[in-house]
Image (cartoon, helix red, strand yellow):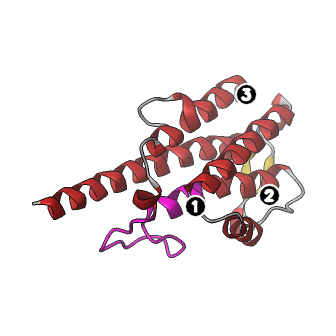
Amino acid sequence: MPDKTMLARRLREAYQESREHSFLASLEGVTERMAQWKPERYRGFPHMDGSILTIAFHAAGDKLVLSSLAFGDGSVAWPQVQERFQALGGNLAVVRGLAEEGQAAALAALAGQREEEMEALCPYYGGQTRTAYDIFRLMAEHDLYHAGQINYVKGLYEGERRARRT
């Protein structure tokens, strides 16, 4: 049976406790200008433009939406989160706030699961289902994945900045 304590630790590590690889660590030192910079030749997900801001927004919003879909009443959906993000200013500070909410929602959903429910199927994107365990595992992996992307874009930004100096 999956260990809720281990999953909670993984969620915390992926979000903030790993100094090297966590989502919040990837945002350290990111300025608003850096967050909005777009790599010249980005080709990836159509809902992102390659900027740190859109990557971070996606990671932050996903926990809110997925927690609601899989473990709540499904009332929090992407259009709502996008609208709220824009209404609050659509900047890095707003992303950080949404990320905190998403992390809290994920941890609260995990705390609300009984051990015997961890193998139960829950609603997932696209009409699919996944076990509760898999959804929490994916949430942690998602933070790490996008933290890596953010770190990569930071490196691209710094390379472009230095190239302009010479």
Q: Are marks 3 and 2 in contact (CB under 8 Å)?
A: no
Q: Which mark lies nearer to you, 1 or 2?
A: 1
Helix, strand or loop at disc 3?
Answer: helix
Residue 59 vertical position relative to residue 126 in the rendered view, above or below: above
Q: Looking at this view, is 101 or 59 the one in front? A: 101
Q: Residue furthest right?
A: 73
Label 2 is placed on what type of residue?
Leu
Bin the neighbour count of mark 3 within 10 Å (Cα to Cα): few under 14, some 14-19, many 20 and up. Answer: some
Q: Earlier in the sequence, mark 1 or mark 2?
A: 2
Q: Residue at x 52, y 64 (%)?
A: 54
Q: Residue at x 38, y 69 (%)?
A: 38
Question: As drawn, is 66 to the left or to the right of 57?
Answer: right
Residue 18 vertical position relative to residue 147 in the rendered view, above or below: above
Q: Earlier in the sequence, mark 3 or mark 1?
A: 3
Q: Quadrant of residue 35?
A: bottom left
Magenta span includes 13: no
Helix, strand or loop at disc 1?
Answer: loop
| Bounds of the magenta segment | 36-59
Magenta span includes 49: yes
Tell me which secondary structure the magenta stretch mostly adopts: loop
Helix, strand or loop at disc 2?
Answer: helix
Residue 119 vertical position relative to residue 71 in the rendered view, above or below: above
**Disc number for residue 4:** 3
**Quadrant containing the C terminus in the rendered view:** bottom left
Q: Earlier in the sequence, mark 3 or mark 2?
A: 3
Bin the neighbour count of mark 1 within 10 Å (Cα to Cα): few under 14, some 14-19, many 20 and up. Answer: some
